[in-house]
Image (tube, coloured by chain):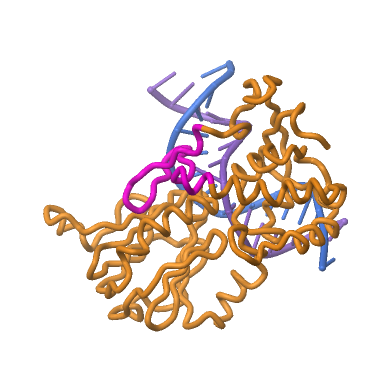
Chain colours: A orange, B blue, C purple
Amino acid sequence: MPELPEVEVTRRSIAGRIAGAQIHGVLLGGVLRWPLNCAPEDLLGHRVQAVRRRGKYLLLDLDVGVLLIHLGMSGRLSFAHQPSSELDKLDKLGKHEHFALQTSLGTLRLKDPRRFGAVVYAQSEQDAVIRKLLGRLGPEPLGADFDLQAFQVALARSKAAIKPGLLSGKLVVGVGNIYACEVLFQAGIHPETRCCDLDHLRMERLHQAIRAVLERAIQRGGSTLRDFSDAQGQAGHFQLETMVYARAGQPCRVCASTVCVIRQGQRSSFFCPACQKP
DNA sequence: CACGGATCCTGATGGC
DNA sequence: TGCCATCAGGATCCGT
């Protein structure tokens, strides 16, 4: 589910409401992708100071340490006060809920049917766990460090196809399958084009398309394909305006050619054979 | 090191 | 209705 726009929309939906909250309880359910890396009791009494994002990771800054949350493929967060009528559920996790943080300002819950997500505690940013997970990530697409010239150099060095290249997290972070397809459409680039075969002008168009598509998707509240919602239950709307993603067999919205789908690295790549050139 | 494929897990969907 | 195969927003690990 969640690519950068969905994670950012989630972050914005909790950041202002959870800041300053004191942790009163921690519930752990089924095993997620990685262990919590501390005893749940260790979190009690600490306060959430801020919520940041790095790539598709959410980082809850605590007064001591940081709680890293990844939504994997099917994860979503909710943050709400427990309705008084449901006080008896305070110490329970619902179906497919694997983590809950009870705080003075509400309860943060992670629901993740496929359990590809994770919640990991680290004492500091220097912690080995953080360095392992975040250490080799590429630049933030919406930040100042997403430099065009560095992007061009990195592309010129890679012989991989551009579509899996965008998904790798090395050239840039946060671009998943939906937005990789949409970005390549906007840039007019066929998904099988080798990174190193792009000329500098097409690289620049790609660089601009990454920013434009992700920013637009955040504005639209992300994409809700099945069940994504922000932490207040609001669905996204970007899926209504995708140009190629999940549109195989349908007419291109620009030229009316039939949208194609191929498999690259076990993932579907959707593209318009007329608008997107090798 | 760089790349492609298999892999973790559950649920939805479509064919028979 | 049931059963089976296939596919789904991610990222790591392993073999070449």
Q: Where is residue A146 in the image (x, y as percent from the top left)?
A: 67, 62
State which region is magenta.
Answer: A216-240
Q: Where is residue A10 in the image (x, y as percent from the top left)?
A: 42, 55
Work out which residue is located at the far left of the displayed protein and give it.
Answer: A85
- Magenta stretch mostly in which secondary structure? loop
Q: Position of residue A228 (x, y in %)?
A: 43, 44
- Residue A220: in magenta span: yes
A12 relative to A197 in the view: left or right: left
Q: Where is residue A240 in the image (x, y as percent from the top left)?
A: 49, 32
Up-down relation of residue A152 to residue A42 (above or below): above
Viewer-side residue, A71 vs B9: A71
Q: Residue at x 67, y 39 (%)?
A: A186
Up-down relation of residue A132 to residue A192 (above or below): below
Disc count in the image?
Answer: 0
Residue A249: image quadrant is top right
- Residue A186: in magenta span: no
A189 relative to A222 in the view: left or right: right
